[in-house]
Image (cartoon, rainbow, N blue to C red):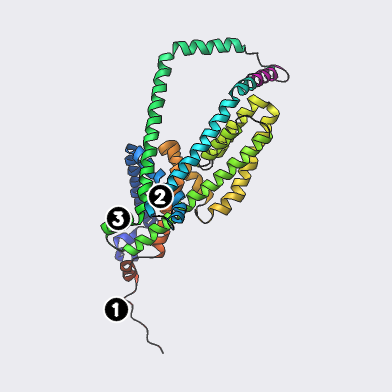
């Protein structure tokens, strides 16, 4: 009898093909599960984003709440920390709004002068582009606004609806963060009781995932604040208008990995081009390269190395996939979700359940122990 005739039917298939097929169906099931998760989240975008922002607020304010809780009741410590944060952000936005309002007249004059200089440079040597009549262009813009006033009003109402939805989500996020900060441990303990099984194993994996999420959140805030500070100082030195609002834009854009900071600095370059001319715009553009190098080679290795153990290629693919699936929100959420999932997976692998350990251990009947000589 040959080897093929006596072999098991599964063994007739080559080993590599069997392994590939096994991975294929598992990856297919995982892909379908991820797709269904995003479909459900797409239906509940407001709630999902509110919970995510609530977790962000909890991760950022947890050290401050723990500090206040040493002298105050836990609930009162949460309220004090939230109020201080709201007052701080309100003060920053009020200061920036006042600075923008104070610079609006001067900024309009600078923009008109800058656009005139840009037009003059484009029509001159060496480009010799045809001149554009700014007066005629302005009249065309006014005519377009007149004929499309109804559509613009509809878009404005849509924008107001989006703003109201964003405000609702923010209120819901703060509401969630209050309960996460006051009774997060009790909520997690209740969830563990509902799951059953090896609670200690899942508790350790979940706490490791939370540590990764909190570390990632605080790391992003540190990197965003550093980028915003550097941008603000550079724009103030170069006397680019709206330095503080552009720095604030850089801060929030840093929460979108890889692409957020370059986009924000690109906006700063356009402002510098219109208000200060091509030379200052080139200096601001060089700032994009310098800050990118500082962020990529200094801040990320120092701040993120312990929190997020992901390869840069994995981060890039994750951001791209999140952007395709859910736009800007997906780009923001993708990296922490993948980082937390990877941490939980590696923690569970490092601490297998007792049942799995018992099933993998060799039995004495199947593998008798050899007696010593």
Query: Over which residues does the magenta segment extend?
Result: 112-127
Between discs 3 and 2, the one toward the N terminus: 2
Q: Secondary structure at mark 1?
A: loop
Q: Secondary structure at mark 2?
A: helix
Give me the disc on residue 15: none
Height in image: 272 above or below 37? above
Left or right of 28 on screen, residue 281: right
Instruction: Pick the residue in front: 260 or 226.
Output: 226
Give me the disc on residue 78: 2
Q: Quadrant of the N terminus?
A: bottom left
Height in image: 28 above or below 370? above
Disc nearest the viewer among 2 and 1: 2
Q: Is residue 126 visible in the rendered structure shown here?
A: yes
- Residue 118 on the magenta span: yes
Q: Measuring from the top left, give residue 300's x and y in whole percent.
A: 56, 50
Q: Quadrant of the C terminus?
A: bottom left
Instruction: Pick the residue in front: 338 or 63.
Output: 63
Residue at the location (48% across, 12% down)?
144
Disc nearest the viewer among 3 and 2: 2
Residue annotated with mark 3: 191
Residue annotated with mark 1: 365
Disc nearest the viewer among 3 and 1: 3
Height in image: 117 above or below 333? above
């Amino acid at each position: 009898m040959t080897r093929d005739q006596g072999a098991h039917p599964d063994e007739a298939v080559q080993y590599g093909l069997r392994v590939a097929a096994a991975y294929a169906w598992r990856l297919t099931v995982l892909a379908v599960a991820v797709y269904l998760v995003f479909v459900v989240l797409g239906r509940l975008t407001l709630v999902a984003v509110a919970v995510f922002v609530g977790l962000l607020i909890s991760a950022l304010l947890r050290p401050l709440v723990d500090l206040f809780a040493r002298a105050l009741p836990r609930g009162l410590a949460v309220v004090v920390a939230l109020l201080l944060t709201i007052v701080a952000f309100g003060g920053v936005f009020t200061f920036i709004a006042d600075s923008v309002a104070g610079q609006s007249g001067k900024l309009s004059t600078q923009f008109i002068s800058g656009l005139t200089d840009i037009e003059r440079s484009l029509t001159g040597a060496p480009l010799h582009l045809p001149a554009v009549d700014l007066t005629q262009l302005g009249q065309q813009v006014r005519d377009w606004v007149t004929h499309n006033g109804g559509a613009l009003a509809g878009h404005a109402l849509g924008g107001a609806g989006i703003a109201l939805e964003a405000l609702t989500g923010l209120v819901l996020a703060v509401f969630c963060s209050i309960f996460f900060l006051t009774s997060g441990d009790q909520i997690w303990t209740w969830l563990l009781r509902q799951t059953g099984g090896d609670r200690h194993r899942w508790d350790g994996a979940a706490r490791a995932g939370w540590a990764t999420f909190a570390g990632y959140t605080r790391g992003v805030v540190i990197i965003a604040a550093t980028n915003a500070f550097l941008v603000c100082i550079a724009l103030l030195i170069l006397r680019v208008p709206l330095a503080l609002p552009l720095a604030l834009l850089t801060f929030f854009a840093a929460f979108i990995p890889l692409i957020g900071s370059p986009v924000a600095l690109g906006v700063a370059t356009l402002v510098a081009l219109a208000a200060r001319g091509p030379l200052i715009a080139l200096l601001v553009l060089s700032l994009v390269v310098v800050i990118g190098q500082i962020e990529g080679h200094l801040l990320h290795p120092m701040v993120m190395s312990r929190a997020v153990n992901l390869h840069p290629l994995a981060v890039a693919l994750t951001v791209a996939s999140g952007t395709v699936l859910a736009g800007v929100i997906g780009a923001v959420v993708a990296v922490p979700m993948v980082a937390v999932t990877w941490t939980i997976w590696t923690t569970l692998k490092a601490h297998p359940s007792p049942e799995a350990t018992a099933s993998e251990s060799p039995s004495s009947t199947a593998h008798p122990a050899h007696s010593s000589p």
